[in-house]
Every structure is written in C-alpha cells, then in structure tokens.
Amino acid sequence: MDIVKKLKYEGYENIAYIDEVGRGCLFGDVVACAIIIDESMPIEGVKDSKKLSIKKREKLYEQIYNDAKAIGLSRVDSKVIDKINIKQATRLAMKMAVEGLKDREGNRIVPDYLLIDAETIDMPIPQQGIIGGDDLIYGISAASIIAKVYRDKLCDDWENDYPGYNIMKNKGYGTKEHRDGLITIGPSPLHRRTFIKKILEGKK
C-alpha cells in the first residue's frame, strides 16, 4: 500500500502536499506551494517540474489550479534567506504556504496531514518528509509545478527591474552568464549575499 492510500485508510482526508523552488538560486525569493488535490484522479503528465518543458508546465499549471481543492503560495526574500539561511528560509516558506491554504472561495483550509518534499516543518500537524517526493508523490509533483511556474513569472518581472544577469533565462541560478554579470556590474538588491560571496571575492 502506498503512503497516500495508507494515510487515507487511516482516516486522513485533507492531505497537503508541499514543495519549494529556488532553493539553489543566487538571486531572488525561495517560493513554496502547498496543495490539497485529489490524487485518485490524477491529471495526465504531472511529474517533477524539472522534468517538464516550459510549455507543458504552464499547461499543467492551469489544469492543477482548476482541479485543486486548495492552494497556498508563499515567498521568502533574499534578505531573510541571508539572515536565517536557506534551509530555515525554505522551511519558513513551506510553513507559510500551509498557513495560506485557501479554496476557490477564499476559505482557509487546515490540512490534517502534510507530505513534504525532503523536509519537515515546525507545525503541530502530523507530517512526513519524502526524499525525492516531487518525483514519487503526485500531489508533491503538482505543488512543484505550481511553485515553479509562479517563480518563473517572478523571474520575468525581475529581468525588467534588474537587467544584466539574464534572470529571465537562468531563473536566478549560477550560470556562467549570471556569474559574469555579477563580476561586471555587481550584485543587485535581490541577490543572496551569502550565496555570492565567493564569486565576488574572486573578482578582487
């Protein structure tokens, strides 16, 4: 019996699935999504967002939004990441996403169990971290798609505000072009100082 069926058998009805995106980026927010979705009737093609094309992700994003019982999205910015470290910032974003779970009418939904991609969070709700959950658990895959498409749209906006790093293309990750931009024009206000220290030290 897989874990979701087991939890349903044990009486858990509102299982929230949680994932994040942007953890390894040099630039911008870490974004988390919590979702409650019917895993008994899965949308075809839903899998780890990293394994999908942009076009496919965006199509699935709309389908998942229409199918979900509740969705919560949250962001933790680079200043907080630098202050508390990326692991704690990721956990904070995940917690905020769970606290923000709302149905289509805007009503708050409190889950009775959490299945999280490779993490646990400080909440008085039964939970389990699943290593590779975004590839193994349908609901976590759905959360990964929502978080990824949402953050990619933020990257498009950030590109306009902070040109020179090609954030629209690299999504804030440390590509050569991005690192070269850091060395040439220096960091923007949205860069994670704790992530780029060595790159800037290499400039000296």
Image (cartoon, rainbow, N blue to C red):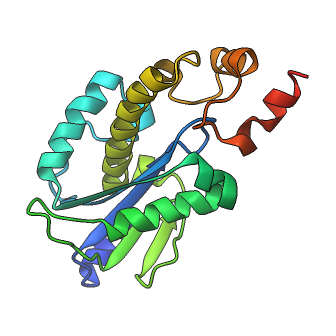
Question: Which residue is painted at 28% across and 75% down in the image?
Answer: 111
Image coordinates of residue 140 in percent, x first then y, are: 37, 54
Question: Can residue 2 be seen at all in this image of the molecule?
Answer: no
Question: Which residue is painted at 46% across and 22% down in the image?
Answer: 159
Question: Which residue is painted at 34% across and 40% down in the image?
Answer: 150
In the foreground, 7 or 145: 145
Look at the image and tell me in which quarter the C terminus lies.
Answer: top right
173 sits to left or right of 15 = right
In the foreground, 66 or 200: 200
Name the residue furthest right: 204
Query: Compared with residue 165, is residue 11 higher up or lower down, i.e. above or below?
Result: below
Question: Can residue 113 be seen at all in this image of the molecule?
Answer: yes
Name the residue furthest left: 105
Image coordinates of residue 67 in percent, x first then y, are: 13, 51
In the foreground, 200 or 141: 200
Image coordinates of residue 47 in percent, x first then y, are: 35, 41
Image coordinates of residue 76 in percent, x first then y, are: 50, 53
Total number of numbered labels?
0
Look at the image and tell me in which quarter the N terminus lies.
Answer: bottom left
The image quarter containing residue 153 is: top left
Question: Which residue is painted at 38% across and 71% down in the image?
Answer: 114
32 sits to left or right of 81 = left
In the foreground, 202 or 185: 185
